[in-house]
Image (tube, coloured by chain):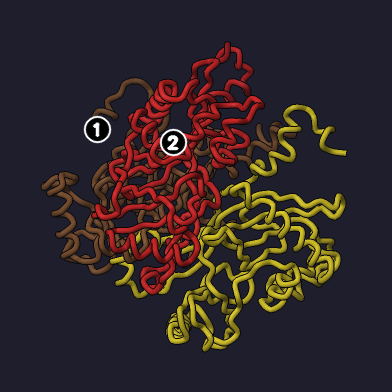
Chain colours: A red, B yellow, C brown
Amino acid sequence: MNSEEIESIKTPVFGNKWILRWESDREMKEKLMREANLPMPAPISDPKDINKMVIVKRQGAAGGKGYFMAANHEEYNTKRNQLISEGVLSNDETLYIQEYAAGVLAYLQFFYSPLKEELEFFGVDQRHESDIEGLARIPAEQQLKLTKIPSFNVIGNSPLVLRESLLEQVYEMGENFVEASKRMVSPGMNGPFCIEGVYDENAQFKSFEFSARIVAGSNIYMDGSPYYSLLFKIATESNQLDKITT
Amino acid sequence: MNSEEIESIKTPVFGNKWILRWESDREMKEKLMREANLPMPAPISDPKDINKMVIVKRQGAAGGKGYFMAANHEEYNTKRNQLISEGVLSNDETLYIQEYAAGVLAYLQFFYSPLKEELEFFGVDQRHESDIEGLARIPAEQQLKLTKIPSFNVIGNSPLVLRESLLEQVYEMGENFVEASKRMVSPGMNGPFCIEGVYDENAQFKSFEFSARIVAGSNIYMDGSPYYSLLFKIATESNQLDKITT
Amino acid sequence: MNSEEIESIKTPVFGNKWILRWESDREMKEKLMREANLPMPAPISDPKDINKMVIVKRQGAAGGKGYFMAANHEEYNTKRNQLISEGVLSNDETLYIQEYAAGVLAYLQFFYSPLKEELEFFGVDQRHESDIEGLARIPAEQQLKLTKIPSFNVIGNSPLVLRESLLEQVYEMGENFVEASKRMVSPGMNGPFCIEGVYDENAQFKSFEFSARIVAGSNIYMDGSPYYSLLFKIATESNQLDKITT
């Protein structure tokens, strides 16, 4: 379904169906992230301006297939042309170029309840993408002989917990995103959402995406997550749920 | 114990003790996987025919120690000779050569109950092998100076959940394996088993192995897995087990 | 707080506050690990003696920021100078040089109860460090163009289970550490601690650190770990706790 079709659904949808358009359009996405004051890798509007490592992405939630990396304009053109000739990209496809942020991947899962006006940090996951992940197991010597362009096709997710000192900023980012959504896309970011990014060598988070809906990574935590446990399970097991709920 | 010894055990063994021979012999393994219609990396019968990246494996469940990668016949010979001189491989050892499948590793854990005639998809794990995994943390520049041949010695396992759209094929592969085992190795694949492989950049699974028994990766899920939870835990906790069982 | 400040705390502290000095001082740390007979990567006292891959570490629990790898004396000097000029290291900082151990990272979490005189193996985690982890997703060709020195800043942790055959040695190492601590730092290693290292291609563990306190990796196991489950949960669920406790 495209955005128009989603928005025309008459059955009430849990969450905010209007915000999905902001998720799938790169320019709107960037605008909302900027409004939420999320630290972002710089977007690059003209391929000629590529002067450091970038990642080139497609519009919409294509699942990462066809994304590629480039270090300069020439490499951008070569790879784009190769992917077009392989039928992965189409000739007139608009691509989105973003400074490449390297480090530890972290997909921050939240739930905002407009009933309680409460933001819950639910858990963290890492995405596993093919075949970029497979590179890690191919020695450099062999990698240099490969001609295939690695792709970022999402295959699965695995759990992560964060260094405690990072948690304060996590809540801050979640709250900022909720507030920005209230201002920009009424009635705001209700329900589950995910802020997606990477921690650099200074433990600074850079967010390259968000998902304004439940994400696959939450499947890991079918029985609850470490962070969720802190909120609810201890209370349940000790029969003190009434002390933390109202 | 070798296959003869296992098969001569008089005490009843849970599962199918005859199928373990099919697991440990590379040719029989390949035959059963083909019968189950599992997508497989191509085997290469003559080292002279290596013209792309391959992985070279030993017979039996050696745990990955002594496995190596090669891109051509010359590299195969050089590495094999080095490993023989290091005492890792023996001179007359039969090696099994398989096209190298790159991407996201996924070990699919199943349980088939012949009593209920039901296949359960229990969980997924990733294997961690040494020292191939360590390569990921060594910069390419440094890697190029190393002379040691990386090995694939299994050390541990970590959890993974799969992108939802991949699950249908997972069940299909599990069912095909159960059916093929019924035809080939009476009474078939009863109890736990594992289909082991990798998802490529098109999210296509290639299976390079199976284990016809409980695998170490299930240790992750001592208290249940995300997929298992969907089957049983929700019902248990809400006292509705009778609604999903008969 | 520095060691003097911690040791001067008048409020009773759970565990052994004296051992924290042994954790933060590299020489004392090495001494205690040697007393515990832990297999260790060789320390290198003079940078001139670097003749294989080493990792250069800072004193104290700096969280890995500023750690770097080097293959020889020249590379050591170049990188050290670069990090000093970037303000990451200070000019007069004492650095600790250790042979680089490659393989599968494993942080072994223990709990020793002096009341029961019982050692519990609680769980295992892997640390995720930035931006060294990010290297794995950058093709070798691109890596070779980078000039930035990768860092080891700890960002988070993820779960792992170990191949069963490795468990015996895990308990042995934990017990040795408890015994050594009793001899060296009265009253010994009470409460949670962590032995941190890497499994090489022969599945031999090399320990490069310990933490004489609860570690962040235990956050993964807020609701229990696979190993913990074997000890307690099964008994709880089946109302048989009295059979395993006294």
Q: Image height check: is C87 above or below C53?
A: above
Cα distance between the residues tagged 1 and 2: 36 Å
Q: What is the number of the mark on residue C20?
A: none
Q: Quadrant of residue C182?
A: top left
**Is residue C245 shown to the viewer in this render?**
yes
Q: Seen in the image, is B240 located left or right of residue C3?
A: right
Q: Image height check: is C244 above or below B79?
A: above
Q: Image height check: is A19 above or below C122?
A: above
Q: What is the number of the mark on residue C2?
A: 1
Query: Which residue in the protein does label 2 denote?
Result: A195
At which x and y percent is residue A172? 37, 26
Q: Chain of mark 2?
A: A
Camera-nearest label, 1 or 2: 2
At which x and y percent is residue B197? 60, 63
At which x and y percent is residue B128? 51, 58
Residue at image position (49%, 78%) is: B52
